[in-house]
Amino acid sequence: YELTQPLSVSVALGQTARITCGGINIESKNVYWYRQKPGQAPVLVIYRESNRPSGIPERFSGSNWGNSATLTISRAQAGDEADYYCQVWHSSTVVFGGGTKLTVL
Amino acid sequence: QVQLVASGGGVVQPGRSLRLSCAASGFTFSTYAMHWVRQAPGKGLDWMAVISYDGRNYYYPDSVKGRFTISRDNSKNTLYLQINSLRVEDTAVYYCARGAPSSDYFASAHLDFWGQGTLVAVSS
């Protein structure tokens, strides 16, 4: 099972960024999103499509429909620049997307 | 607070073996599944293994079956990853991460806390 993410996404400061994660019938799966800043370990930002762990701002949200899940970051800030990875379970194994580099202009 | 500290990495020759450790604190280790995930330099995340809270069940991706072994010692709050027949392409930072609580199926849910990782460099 493969998850496809765009290599890069750019967003203007204060605007909305959308990062997609494509997979066959992904809407039937729970999707998780992680943020990774350079030199740091990944951090969970969204679980089960649209839930945020404590400490993650409301600006982060998720959706999942059809063959694509989306991480939406509203009012993008410079501190949101990072690599973002989606993740699902398939046949008892963890599958990560290839990652998307978010640039805030 | 949850802490996961990975260790055991270093420079290793191809064909040798290595055992990584991950010391857990700040939560009841014996009630959570645990994972290993690696990241080659400049590359994405690559999942390596998951083990159930009691150590009885585990899964690996096909790419590492037979070479990697995940285990845990709940009395020591420590997770392990044994890597045999190391290859140059195993060079990566290896992260341990917390998985599903024992109330959930172990091969499900998110990885909610990650350690800082330990670097394994395979080179002759």
Image (cartoon, coloured by chain):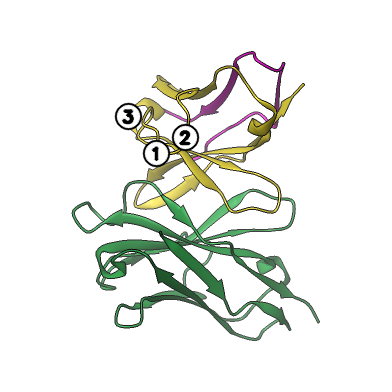
Where in the figure is residue A45, as x and y percent of width and height?
A: 47, 37
- Residue drawn at x 38%, y 45% is A90
- Residue drawn at x 65%, y 25% is A77
Where in the figure is residue A17, as x and y percent of width and height?
A: 61, 19
Q: Colour of chain A?
A: yellow
Q: Which residue is mark 2?
A: A56
Q: Which residue is mark 1?
A: A53
Look at the numbered disc 2 and give the secondary structure of its residue.
Answer: loop
Q: Amino acid at mark 2?
A: Ile
Callout 3: 10 Å neighbours few (<14), some, many (20+)?
few
Where in the figure is residue A46, as x and y percent of width and height?
A: 43, 34
Chain of the residue that carries numbered disc 3 in the rendered image: A
- Residue drawn at x 38%, y 63% is B34
Please state, as top left, top right, bottom left or bottom right, where the N terminus of chain B lies in the image.
bottom left
Residue B72 colored magenta? Answer: no
Answer with mark 3 or mark 2, whichever residue precedes in sequence.
3
Answer with mark 3 or mark 1, whichever residue precedes in sequence.
3
Q: Give the residue at the far bottom of this rendering.
A: B16
Provide the letter of the chain coloured green.
B
Start-end of magenta stretch? A1-24
Q: Which mark is residue A28?
A: 3
Q: Nearer the viewer, mark 3 or mark 1?
A: 1
Where in the figure is residue B5, as x and y percent of width and height?
A: 52, 70
Callout 1: 10 Å neighbours few (<14), some, many (20+)?
few
C-alpha gap between disc 3 and disc 2: 25 Å
